[in-house]
Every structure is written in structure tokens, then in C-alpha cells.
Amino acid sequence: MKLTEIADNPGSRPSRIRVGRGIGSGKGKTSGRGVKGQKARSGVAVKGFEGGQMPIHRRLPKGGFKNLFRVAYLPVNLGKVQAAVDAGRIEAGATVTAAVLAETGVLGLRRGFPVRLLADGEITVALNFEVDAASASAVAAVEAAGGKVTIIPKREVPRKEGKKAVRRKAQIAKKEAREAARA
């Protein structure tokens, strides 16, 4: 065999269709693009266009609802905490907070998210939990093991006030100051 004899397998590289080479080829004149119009021109991709008819993505109703005030909790199961205790990462009788769970690797390192204690798995060691939320069955399981669950009160998130509200508060403060000066 010589280098000049090397070739691809027959049919593995089909030759490209040569368009615009006469009507006898079947791909002459309009080159397989039909007749005139926008899609006969090059560089046209009209995705979702249905000829002026209202497109299906606008005909179908919108669905669902996204609650802007939803609290996303990070779930922590009792079985994972017990595995950390068995591995010696958490001491028996210790106070378990979100920071402790993050340090020991039970919780992902996503700070600022509230933690919810769930009852998947068993716990046999007495631990004191300080979490943002807990299921009733998780609280019962921890108390049965001799521990305690303390729910951290919800932190008040300061809301951004609009310009109108700030201006109105300033007006009220001025009015009260004038009335205090008169009296």
C-alpha cells in the first residue's frame, strides 16, 4: 500500500450538492430555496414566526406563581448529624448551630441561608440544636434522645423604602418639630 492509495471508505464523505447549475440538476434556478421571499434570502432564521398569526408561545396561558417572600431553608437530616457524631466531628452534648454544621461538613458552605431540621434517620446522642425551623417529628426525635431544639426567632429583614416614603417621613418630622416649637 502506498500513501497515494489511501482513501476513505466509499460513502463516508458524500460530495456536497452543487446548487444553481441548471434546471436539469434538480437544484438549479432557485437552488432548492423555493421562490422569492424572506426565506429565500441568506441569513434568515425566523424562529417562532407563524406567518403573522399569533405564535403558540403567546397563545398558551401563563402558569405558576413565584413567591417573592418565600424562605428557602437548607435541610439537615438527623441521620447526617448522627453520622458526623459517629465520625467524631461533633461532640455529644454540644450545641449544634448552622456554623457548626458548616464547619463539620454536614451542611454546604452556603452562609446566610436558614436551616431546617428534618427527621430522616435516627439520632441516639443528646444534642442541643439552634436552628431556624424544625419539623415536629425531628423535635420529638431529638427530645427522645435527651436533647433540645431551640428555634431561632425570625430576623426582621430591613426593607428598602421608596423616595416617596422617605420624603413623607421627612415632612411628618418637620411638622412635628414645628408643632413642638409652638407649644
Image (cartoon, rainbow, N blue to C red):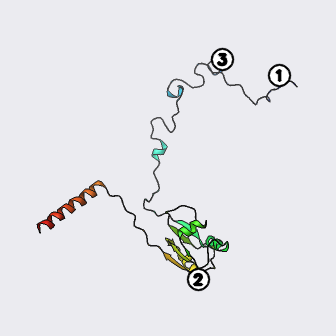
Residue drawn where x is 15% and y is 63% of the image: 178
Q: Residue 144 — which label?
A: 2
User: How many angstroms separate mark 3 from mark 1 (CA)?
Assistant: 35 Å
Image x and y of residue 99, in percent:
54, 68
Quarter-of-image position of residue 58: top left
Crowding at dot 1, Cα within 10 Å, few <14 / some 14-19 / many 20+, comes out as few
Residue nearest the observer in this picture, 35 or 133: 133
**Horizontal placement of 1 versus 20: left or right?**
right
Name the front one of labels 3 and 1: 1
Residue type at mark 2: give it. Ala
Crowding at dot 3, Cα within 10 Å, few <14 / some 14-19 / many 20+, comes out as few
User: How many angstroms separate mark 3 from mark 2 (CA)?
Assistant: 89 Å
Residue drawn where x is 76% and y is 31% of the image: 12
Residue type at mark 3: give it. Gly
Q: Residue 4 — which label?
A: 1
Label located before the other in sequence (1 or 2): 1
Q: Residue 164 — which label?
A: none
Image x and y of residue 152, in percent:
46, 73
Residue type at mark 1: give it. Thr
Furthest-right residue in this view: 1
Answer above or below: position of 21 versus 139.
above
Name the front one of labels 3 and 2: 2
Residue denoted by label 3: 24
Secondary-structure class at tag 1: helix
Answer above or below: position of 65 versus 49.
below
Residue nearest the observer in this picture, 16 or 169: 169
Task: Locate the N terminus by quadrant.
Answer: top right
